[in-house]
Amino acid sequence: MIKNTLTGKQKRFLRSMGITMDPVVMIGKEGVSPTVVQSAAEAIKKRELVKVRVLQNCMEDPESAITMLAERTNSDLVQIIGHNGLLFKRNFDSPKIELPK
């Protein structure tokens, strides 16, 4: 189950940050494989906010692939637009993003 711990204001703030970001995690022909999940988890831990792109050769539906990745990395799904999605997970050890209240 996707945890939804973000308020609307926080999601809006994260979406505005995600506009200028380049996709870090690509979901390709293999779909949401363990390798993709591991690389996404490492990127999320380092950056907190990650943009995900589902490539054209992926057999899965982009929305379901991004949702599945969010579940497997235990992160918040901020937004899905077309083939792109934003995932957020707070790093309590060394936070990089200060969310509004």
Image (cartoon, rainbow, N blue to C red):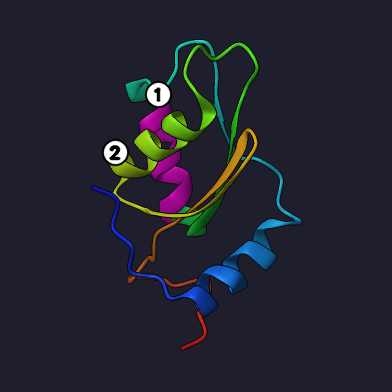
Which secondary structure type mostly characterizes the magenta part of the structure? Answer: helix
Say left or right for 57 vs 90.
right
Circles 2 and 1, Cβ within 8 Å, touching? The answer is: yes
Say left or right for 10 vs 93.
right
In the rendered image, the vertical position of residue 90 relative to residue 46, given as above or below:
below
Dot 2 alpha-carbon crowd within 10 angstroms: few under 14, some 14 to 19, many 20 or more: some
In this view, which residue lies farthest toward the right?
20
- Out of 37 and 66, give the one closest to the viewer: 66
Three-letter amino acid code at the position of disc 1: Val
- Percent across and percent down for residue 99 are 50, 79
Q: Residue at horizontal 40%, vertical 71%? A: 6
Using the image, tell me which numbered label, if any, was put on residue 72. 2
Which image quadrant is residue 40 in? top left
Q: Residue at horizontal 37%, vertical 65%? A: 91
Q: Residue at horizontal 53%, vertical 79%? A: 9
Q: Secondary structure at mark 2?
A: helix
Q: Which residues are magenta?
A: 36-45
Q: CA distance from mark 2 to mark 1?
A: 9 Å
- Percent across and percent down for residue 31 are 44, 18
Q: Secondary structure at mark 1?
A: loop
